[in-house]
Image: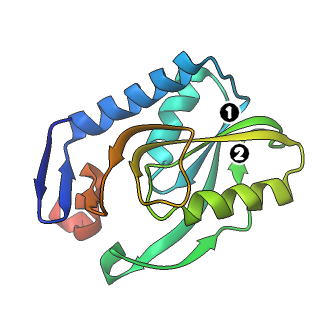
């Protein structure tokens, strides 16, 4: 992976970001595990979720979660999980692939998994896939591309829009 690193920060290029999504998809495919739905966690999991839904030809469902709202999105706060899932599927059932961009503390993956099973008993199995897995997380995702030692801030290429306004395009 071609990245730029310095003092606890890692910057990811668009090319590396897109290639990492493809590597993750290949990893899931090569595992032989099949799934009925993709549920991506918005916002970070939107792009990977879209790619997976297209490649595996399964419905895409979206659940909005947020914990990084303070200090311009760089300070973790309380986890908020939306009340509803947006989906074209009638119900979430069977095997579900839960996708996000990264697992940091593990709190989001753990709590969303519990939330899903409580609200959707038709789900028979949940597996998780992320691009970056911070090894100090309390949860290890089933699939990941880049193990990350320590706790660097991973600057993803789309974050540039966090600091822009439409009139600066």
**Vertical placement of residue 138 versus 97, above or below:** below
Name the disc covering residue 87, or none: 2
Q: Categorize mark 1 by other alpha carbons within 10 Å: few (<14), some (14-19), many (20+).
A: some
Asked if residue 70 lies left or right of residue 30, the reply is left
Q: CA distance from mark 2 to mark 1?
A: 7 Å
Which residue, given by chain and number where applicable, does mark 1 sit on? 59
Q: Quadrant of the C terminus?
A: bottom left
Spot occupied by residue 106 in the image (x, y as percentages of width and height)? 53, 61
**Which of the 4 image quadrants contains residue 161?**
bottom left
Residue 9 appears left or right of 153? left
Find residue 52 and report its horizontal and vertical position in percent: 53, 30
Return the residue found at the far right. Answer: 121
Q: Position of residue 148 (x, y in %)?
A: 32, 50
Q: Secondary structure at mark 2?
A: strand
Which residue is drawn at the image coordinates 73% and 68% (left, top)? 83
Mark 2 neighbour density, 10 Å: few (under 14) some (14–19) many (20 or more): some
Which sits earlier in the primary sequence, circle 2 or circle 1? Answer: 1
């Amino acid at each position: 992976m071609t990245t730029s690193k310095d003092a606890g920060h890692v910057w990811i290029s668009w090319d590396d970001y897109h290639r990492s999504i493809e590597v993750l998809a290949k990893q899931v495919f090569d595992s032989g595990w099949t799934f009925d739905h993709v549920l991506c966690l918005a916002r970070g999991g939107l792009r990977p979720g879209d790619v997976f839904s297209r490649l595996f030809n399964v419905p895409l469902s979206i659940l909005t979660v947020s914990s990084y709202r303070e200090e311009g999105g760089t300070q973790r706060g309380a986890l908020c999980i939306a009340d509803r899932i947006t989906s074209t599927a009638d119900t979430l059932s069977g095997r579900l692939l839960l996708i996000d961009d990264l697992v940091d503390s593990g709190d989001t993956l753990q709590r969303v998994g519990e939330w899903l099973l409580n609200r959707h008993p038709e789900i028979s199995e949940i597996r998780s896939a992320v691009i970056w897995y911070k090894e100090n997380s309390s949860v290890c995702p089933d699939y990941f591309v880049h193990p990350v030692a320590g706790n660097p801030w991973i600057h993803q290429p789309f974050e540039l829009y966090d600091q822009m306004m439409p009139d600066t395009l």
